[in-house]
Amino acid sequence: MKNHFTFLLLFLTVSLFAQAELPTMIYLVRHAEKITSDPKDSNPSLTENGNKRAIALAERLKQKPLNTIYSTNYKRTRSTAIPTAENQKKKVNLYDAKNLKLAASIILKENKGKQALVVGHSNTILETIEALGGQRPIPTIEDQEYDYLFLVTISTRGKIKVKVMHYGQANSHKEGAQMMH
């Protein structure tokens, strides 16, 4: 009995220590393809391809235990995040892309040693990576590029790595000109 108790205590101690030693992992994507037929619409919904991409993102991240999911307050970003949120039984938390330093500090504080998803825009995602302490992995995200999936990993010692991946179908470059990012 004493051996079982000692083993259980050792197991719990190691488990707690291992949890404290997990890296922080932040996944970042630009919203999926949006409707561009009305240049006056500053808050468009996703296209059919965009909805498919949002589902592909949820599928790609289904085995990742996300602690928090963040989106800007636009239809296209929320709609990109919702399938993942539903799969993971999480709500979508809004963040202000106009104050990325503050947003990054909140994201890092709320997700230390955990995993999170951030859905933004072509003109904010790379800047968000930088605000999280990472280096910009590519120079820019073009208007027709929707398939990037970035992963910022912050080790327990503070070392930051940025990984570039892709998800969903390759970019079609067939959507219309973009009026907002």
Image (cartoon, helix red, strand yellow):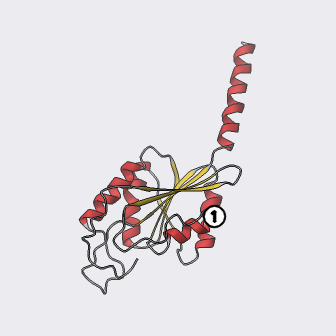
Few, some or many C-alpha atoms within 10 Å of disc 1 (few <14, some 14-19, many ≥20)?
A: some
- Residue at 29 percent of width and 62 percent of height: 51
- Residue at 26 percent of width and 68 percent of height: 47
Left or right of residue 167, residue 153 in this image:
right
Q: Is residue 45 above or below residue 63?
A: below
Residue 83 appears in which quarter of the rendering?
bottom left
Q: Position of residue 69 (x, y in %)?
A: 49, 58
Q: Position of residue 16 (x, y in %)?
A: 68, 37
Q: Quarter of the image containing the N terminus?
A: top right
Q: Position of residue 146 (x, y in %)?
A: 36, 65
Q: Quarter of the image containing the C terminus?
A: bottom left
Residue 95 is at least partly visible in this image: no
Residue 55 is at least partly visible in this image: yes
Residue 162 appears in which quarter of the rendering?
bottom right
Q: Is residue 45 above or below residue 57?
A: below
Q: Position of residue 111 (x, y in %)?
A: 60, 55
- Residue at 47 percent of width and 71 percent of height: 72
Residue 108 appears in which quarter of the rendering?
bottom right
Left or right of residue 63, residue 3 in this image:
right
Residue wearing tag 1: 133
